[in-house]
Amino acid sequence: MINQNVYDELLQKYQAHYGKTPEVVSYAPGRIEVLGNHTDYNEGYVFSAAINYGTFFAISRNDKGVNRIVAGDLMHEVTFPLTGATAVTEDTWANYVIGTVAGLNAVKAQDTGFDAMFLGNVPMGFGLSSSAALEMCTAKAVCKLYDITADNVTLAKIGQAAERDYAGCPCGLLDQISSLCGVEGMLVKTDFRTLDIETVDMGPSVCFLMCNPHAKHALVDGQYATRRQACEDAAAYFAKVLPHPVAALRDVSMAEWTANKDGLDPIVANRAAHPIGEDERVLEGAKLLEKGDLKAFGQLLFASHESSRTMFENSCEELDNVVAVTKTVPGVLGARLSGGGFGGSAVVLVKTEQADTAAQAIAAAYEAKTGKTCEVSKIQPSLGATIVFPA
Ligand code: GLA
């Protein structure tokens, strides 16, 4: 089983804390975003992958009339009511669980409380969606325990609502869909309008590195929300000036942007160019992967980062430096920031046989350039969320 040592530790801690074994254990991974940045809430396209780091969630019923949740790394317990639970201001990690359970209760109400604990190894601060992993392992476990039937899109929307209403981030559906729909060795290509999901095999010749230069940025959520607002304002403008319906920036081509951008505030115009360009890059990338042209696919990652840096302005000096140094490292095919931006990590597409040497070379070149460290981890596209016990 993937991450067996984390699973074993969780079972030991669960037994020690609750004095019983769990009835159900689920697992959900983090994700990398490979191409298609800030396109999900613009109803566009994304290539992503579930990763080989994730979170386990152990649960059983109790007769206490409340839900108890323990963060297994902190061994700290939070209790919350079966109905009407609101966001907490301390132990805010619990909000991802509370929000997800509230969403599931709207599908089918719990008839008893539960005793739960989670433990994971998604590196924190890498921008690998540890929060979506927590929401989706919560969702899988609660559905199994209370016999709730809900498809992946419903679960993803419940996680998204937990982020928005309990954790305060108006994110799209990318992180949850990637965590749920990952397949070993595969990229996940999602159309965020139709929610059609395909898996795409890149073959064994390439893999990914995540590079975390430990960029500290304040107001991340505020910045995400203002970018989203700019995209929505731009879509409303294009709906007025274009001769066809525009429900979201997905409906606008780069040629239409170029011909009509002068009617927009220049900053809003630049913001809109990013998801519009990203959609075109994902569609182009799909054709390149079909042909097996990984070199050209990698170039699209560099182009994506450049668009983040100059148009969407959701990069930062540290991420720009990481991407710049990767261009000097043998075996690297492409690199870009992954996820919301304003910090977090860069994802690097690298030839598998050179992945280890490239990882060392990136860390060394980053240190030589900046005098600071950059943590580099190897990432494998992996299995999505699942029930691991009972088998
Ligand atoms: C974060 C959000 C996602 C998505 C990405 C950017 O990860 O949670 O919904 O918008 O940023 O592509």
Image: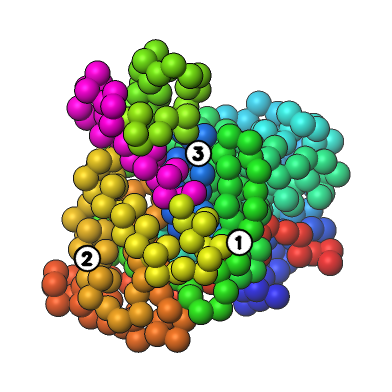
Amino acid, disc 3: Gly
x%, y% of residue 316? 22, 52
Asked if residue 167 shows in the view, the reply is no
Secondary structure found at label 1: strand
Q: Quadrant of residue 344?
A: bottom left
Q: Circle 3: is it few (<14), some (14-19), or many (20+) Cα within 10 Å?
A: many
Query: Camera-side residue: 327 or 316?
Result: 327
x%, y% of residue 194? 63, 36
Instruction: State how many labels appear.
Output: 3
Query: Camera-side residue: 358 or 234?
Result: 234
Span of residues in magenta: 258-283
Secondary structure found at label 3: loop
Q: Circle 2: is it few (<14), some (14-19), or many (20+) Cα within 10 Å?
A: some
Secondary structure found at label 2: helix
Give the CA separation, mark 1 to mark 2.
28 Å
Amino acid, disc 2: Ala
Query: Camera-side residue: 84 or 345?
Result: 345
Amino acid, disc 1: Val
Does residue 390 sit above or below 59 in this rendering?
below
- Residue drawn 73% across and 59% down? 386
